[in-house]
Amino acid sequence: MSFLQPIFHPVNDILFITSKGSETIEKIEIIDCNGRLVYQSTITHPETVRINVSNFNSGVYFVKVQSESGIGSAKIVKN
């Protein structure tokens, strides 16, 4: 996701997603390793997004981020 700052993991309670430069984050989805959508949000404060993942089970998740210039994805590990 070249329009986003790197996501460092493992993630414990809070996942921070930050755009680079003036890029605007519009929508975020988090999908578990079984393909289930576990989080979806349209973003109202597009520079930095803070997502509480403390209630997620430990494991691997895929983050899909839509911005004004396209869609990117990243893998995260939740402790």
Image: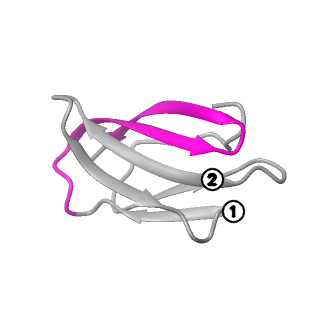
Please give the name of the residue rendered at 67% of the width and 42% of the height, measured from the top-left corner: 4
- CA gap between label 2 and label 1 equals 7 Å
Q: Quadrant of residue 37?
A: top left
Examine the structure image and report whether residue 6 is included in the region drawn in magenta.
no
* Rendered position, 4 above or below 21: above
* Rendered position, 72 above or below 13: above
Q: Give the side of residue 51 with respect to residue 72, left or right.
A: left
Where does the image place residue 59, in percent across and percent down from the top left? 22, 37
Examine the structure image and report whether residue 70 is included in the region drawn in magenta.
yes
Please give the name of the residue rendered at 41% of the width and 59% of the height, measured from the top-left corner: 41
Among all residues in the image, which is located at the extreme bottom? 45
Q: How many labels sit on residues?
A: 2
Q: Earlier in the sequence, mark 2 or mark 1?
A: 2
Decide which of 57, 79 is in the foreground and name it: 57
Element on which disc 2 rests: strand
Q: Give the side of residue 47 with respect to residue 54, left or right.
A: right
Q: Give the side of residue 61 with respect to residue 21, left or right.
A: left
